[in-house]
Image (cartoon, rainbow, N blue to C red):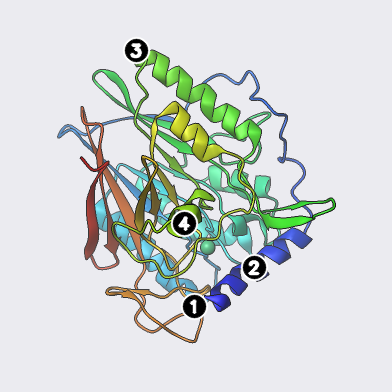
Amino acid sequence: MKRRTFLKDAAFLTAAAAAMPSCIVRDNGAPSADSLRTAGDFRFRNDGTFTLLQFTDTHYIAGDPRSQRALACVKEAIQAVKPDLVIHTGDIVFGRPDIESAQEILQPLAESGIPWAVALGNHDSQFGSSREEMFRAIRELPGCVNHPPKDGVYGCSNDVITLSGARGVERVFYLFDSMDAVVLKGEEEVHCYDYIRHSQIGWYRSYSEHFTVENEGCPVPSLAFFHIPLPELPEALAKGIGPMAGNNGEPPCPSRLNSGLFAQFRELGDVQAVVTGHDHDCDYVLPYGGIHFVYGRFSGGDTIYNHLGPDGYIPSDGPTAPGTVSGCRLFQFREGESGFRTWVRLVGGETQQALSLPCK
Ligand SMILES: [Fe+2]
């Protein structure tokens, strides 16, 4: 455990030492008068289903043979599943040339004709390009539905995607930019992963309240996607609440600062699941306070630590272990139903952790 924590901390310290990207880091405390535009409004298929595929932590480095597994994972899953929407929850790249790396690992999505979006990870602006530059380059790829950064909202990859049925919006997918690292100066200086800012919470609330009003006062079932898990996840584990399914190979590494997003989700009552990546040896689902914490399945290669095999966590003294298998997580929604199904798919097609959430 200590070694993996160190690997992530080492990356964090590098990030903290670097200047924060200045051009997009705004936190004016309130959302601008930005209209309630969405990055896409999707429809169910004729059979009443909608399938969303999540990749996470591809940590791709162009030209590095250790990344071939990541590219193969993305290609195989897209071709086999043919989802209706793809969301990559960040740590897309892990080295220079960073823009070229992003373009290469996202190319199978760009060529697929399937719409896709990203929620950037902490490593995505650590290899030369600013977060804004990386986000702009990603947005230029075919099929990407992310909108430009919102004026007055902290970060880049904050977006809202809706899924509508015959009666209007039935699902909302919120994408937050959980950024990289933060250093708060003062008597007790804090260096840690960044936290969701006040402006992002205000931005989320404005949409959430709008959809609730439009839905005659009933919150619209929603999922939130971002890279770094919330501080309530280790809180749940510390209380003895364990995963209902999946692998728990390492402690979660959220920000040390809790800005209250989880409380907002509970207060507004729409978010059913908080879907993240970041902790490569976890792919579990854990219920807490009426919300499910859901990890994606590591989709990368061997440029970064990973120890999940087809039968679970593989102990190893090295950053990777022989026999690890990448994959993705899937979500399926049905028109007229408030719950959803989720499962993990490994490269090659094996599926694990089939769940219907929320549990009845
Ligand atoms: Fe990662």
Going from the N terminus, do you reach mark 2 or mark 1 first? 2
Position above or below: 165 against 321: above
Q: Which residue is mark 4?
A: 277
Q: Is there a contact, CB below 8 Å, between mark 3 and mark 2?
A: no
Q: Secondary structure at mark 3?
A: loop
Q: Which mark is residue 9?
A: 2
All told, the count of numbered labels is 4
Q: Which residue is mark 3?
A: 216
Which residue is found at the position 49% from the left and 77% from the top? 66
- Please name which of the two marks, 4 or 2, marks the residue nearer to the observer: 2
Q: Which residue is mark 1?
A: 65
Callout 4, which amino acid? Gly
- In the visual, does 79 lie left or right of 104? left
Q: Is mark 3 within 8 Å of ligand 1?
A: no
Callout 2, which amino acid? Asp
For the residues labelled 4 and 2, the Cα–Cα distance comes to 16 Å
